[in-house]
Image: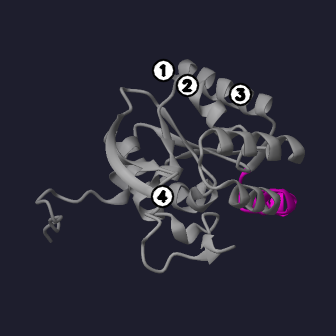
């Protein structure tokens, strides 16, 4: 029996024949927990999952406190994120959107190239939604939750959001206090869904160990 052709005319490979060249390390935690600071210092390719938000004027967006509920996974393109990470791990290059948070719109796109590296970091508040999908694809290396004291997280989040003029201050304060109240339950849920709770230092140590193990196998 002949092998069916894919839409682009190439022969489809069976799942067992797919051999990813890289894997994904998911980095998650409360907004303001230090995810971006951690990923930006590793020197590895980074996918900001926040760039996969839908435009704020998309019909049917969930609402809360009189504004779009950006903490709802319904505001976010999960399928697009999975596809981009799959392409990075199998093809080594992909195109990702560029999102402007103050205006809640996608303003362009950029090309991300692995340049032969074996790990890519993906960080964002919805990273936990990708654990099962990336595991099924065989490209999940680890899922880390960076945890710091709630008062620190609240303060760093507020200072960042005000500095970047992300949203009006009353909305930032309402959202910040809501995050503060929900953090213990959030960490419990992330742990239950297969992520590992670590401090900032422990996250650095885990990444160092993975990279060291990679060097030994090459």
What is the CA distance from the residue labelled 4 to the residue labelled 3? 32 Å
Mark 2 and mark 4: span between their CA atoms? 39 Å
Residue 105 seen in this snapshot: yes
Q: Which residues are magenta?
A: 179-195
Labels 2 & 1 near each other (Cβ < 8 A):
yes
Disc assigned to residue 204 = 3
In this view, 114 is above or below 177: above
Mark 4 or 3: in front is 4
Q: Which residue is mark 1?
A: 218
Q: Position of residue 47 (x, y in %)?
A: 48, 42
Question: What element does badge 4 sit on?
Answer: loop
Q: Earlier in the sequence, mark 4 or mark 3?
A: 4
Sequence order check, earlier mark of 2 and 4: 4
Tell me which secondary structure the magenta stretch mostly adopts.
helix
Of residue 149 and residue 8, the one placed in the foreground of this image is 149
Q: Position of 85 compared to 68: left or right?
A: left
Marks 3 and 2, the one that precedes in the sequence: 3
Residue at 38% from the left image edge and 56% from the top image edge: 83
Rendered image quadrant of residue 126 = bottom right
Assess disc 2: are there few (<14), some (14-19) or many (≥20) residues with their C-alpha within 10 Å of its C-alpha: few
* Disc number placed over residue 214 in the picture, else none: 2
Q: Quadrant of residue 178?
A: bottom right
Quadrant in the rendering for residue 19: top left
Residue tagged by mark 4?
Answer: 104
Q: Give percent across and percent down for residue 177.
A: 82, 59
């Amino acid at each position: 029996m002949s092998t069916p052709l894919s839409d682009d005319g190439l022969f489809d490979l069976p799942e067992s024949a797919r051999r990813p060249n890289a894997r994904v390390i998911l980095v998650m935690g409360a907004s303001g927990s230090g995810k971006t600071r951690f990923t930006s210092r590793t020197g590895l390719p980074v996918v900001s999952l926040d760039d996969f938000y839908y435009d704020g004027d998309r019909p049917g967006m969930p609402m809360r406190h009189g504004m779009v509920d950006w903490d709802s996974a319904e505001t976010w393109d999960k399928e697009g994120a999975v596809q981009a990470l799959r392409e990075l791990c199998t093809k080594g290059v992909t195109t990702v959107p560029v999102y402007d948070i103050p205006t809640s719109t996608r303003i362009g796109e950029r090309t991300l190239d692995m340049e032969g590296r074996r790990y890519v970091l993906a960080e964002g508040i919805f990273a936990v939604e990708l654990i099962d999908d990336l595991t099924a694809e065989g490209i999940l290396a680890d899922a880390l939750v960076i945890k710091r004291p709630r008062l620190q997280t609240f303060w760093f989040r507020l200072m960042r959001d005000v500095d970047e003029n992300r949203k009006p201050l009353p909305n930032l304060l309402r959202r910040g206090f809501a995050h503060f109240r929900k953090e213990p339950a959030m960490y419990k849920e992330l742990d239950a869904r297969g992520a590992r709770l670590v401090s900032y230092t422990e996250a650095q140590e885990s990444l160092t160990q993975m990279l060291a193990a990679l060097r030994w196998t090459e």
